[in-house]
Amino acid sequence: MNVKPSHLFYQGRERKPVLDQARGVYMWDVDGKRYLDGSSGAMVCNIGHSNENVLEAMRRQMEKSTFGYRLHFETEASEKLAAKTAALCPEGLNRVFFVSGGSEAVESALKLARQYALAIGEGSRWKIISRAPSYHGCTLGALAVTSYAPLTEPFAPLMQAMPKIPAPRAYLDGFDPEDEATGHHYADMLEAKIVEEGPDSVLAFLVEPIGGASTGALVPPRGYMERVQEICRKHGVLLILDEVMTGAGRTGKFLASEHWGLAPDIIVMSKGFAAGYVPLGAMVAHERLVEAVLDAGGFLHGYTYAGNPLACAAGLAVIDEIERQDLVGNAARMGVKLKERLEGLMQRYAIIGDVRGKGLLTAFEFMADRGSKAPLPKHLQAFNRFVQIAYDKGLIVYSRRTRDGVEGDHIIVAPPMIVTETHLDEITEVLDASLSQFTEEIRPALGKAV
């Protein structure tokens, strides 16, 4: 492993092996060790690594131009990708604003929503309701609508606090997620919060259709998303869907919102949208919002790399590959098989208290006791330790903590959408070995069979 001094710094001092190359679902370090990318990086590399058709599209664009500032030129690549993106979104969501990542996409959505309210004479609306826990990005605007204590609390004095409602964690609360009454129970909390805050002050509700890092592939209870949309329309509240992690096919539909036939006002995407080939994301807004803002003088917002032609050429090629290989269909098919394998592991290991997800966005959550839903002791740092064990065995997975980032360790398994059953067998085998080692390590701390 590389131990040379580094001038880089990110979250901490931990060092990792130096990446040499990546192909398909595999990555190799400079020492030749192979890793299976079981989380698509950070749920990014949806079509796998080093897809030659995408690389060729990037080469062609590089030979023409790598940058064209949006105030100076329109570009063929950005126009084509915008048209393609609009065609994949619900009717009316046909205006696209490109960004470089998920946090930028969320910031853009919040600002467009606010400008829309001003444009139509509803300037009293400024509050963005979101859920607890939730994660929508690391910039200050995105953090203000995030609820994940380790990431938000240090910066609270810098932010305008926004109202939150509980995420629909039926598995923790002891409710049946297949019962519509459960979905309505959680959705009605949104209406109660709107009334509490004052309907004339609430601008939007921001929500991930299927939970990401903060709730670990949480699929909402039956009836939840439909009721949420109904409540938003009733009170004139914009519905903003954060599809940064779920978009571009990962859940078995191009957009996770398609599972419920939703028609939001704004959708934000990134991560799998360009699948890691370039930094790229998008805010897609309903035309009525955009036209009102443009009529009122224009959108007071922008990024230097918005609509970068090289990024857009790569993004268009990624979508072409998703369609050419039917990767959305493969995500749906392989997702069922992956979840079955995780449920099989749950039968073998008592510390797995829940398995959930849709398509190739799946997760399992550790619990000290399934009956009480008690989490593993915080000091075990299970979410970090398990990931390291799997990594040492050549499998990359992703982890966070479900209970506001403080406890409730969950592991996300989200391989690229090109995954095969053979790959799933390999993932399961390494997870099995990692769980076996991990349970032996924590047995003394729990003082019982695990």
Image: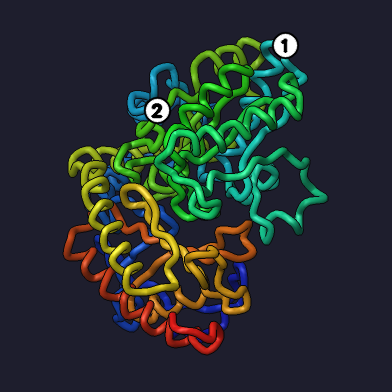
- Mark 2 or mark 1, earlier in chain: 2
Q: Quadrant of the N terminus?
A: bottom left
Alpha-carbon span between mark 2 and mark 1:
29 Å
Q: Is residue 8 visible?
A: yes
Q: Is residue 429 above or below residue 3?
A: above
Q: Tell whether 64 sits left or right of 382.
A: left
- What residue sits 52% from the left and 32% below the top? 184
Quadrant in the picture for residue 23: bottom left
Give me the disc on residue 195: none
Q: Look at label 1 and name its amino acid.
A: Gly
Where is residue 333? Give x, y as percent: 21, 48
- What residue sits 51% from the left and 45% below the top? 101
Q: Residues within 10 Å of mark 2 (few under 14, many from 20)?
A: many
Q: Tell whether 340 sits left or right of 143.
A: left
- What residue sits 45% from the left and 77% below the top? 388
Q: Is residue 262 above or below residue 171?
A: above
Where is residue 310? Give x, y as percent: 39, 42
Numbered disc total:
2
Residue identified by numbered label 1: 121
SS for callout 1: loop
Q: Look at label 2 and name its amino acid.
A: Ala
Residue identified by numbered label 2: 82
- What residue sits 32% from the left and 69% below the top? 347
Of residues 193 and 280, the one nearer the viewer is 193
Where is residue 293? Give x, y as percent: 62, 16
Q: Is residue 98 visible?
A: no
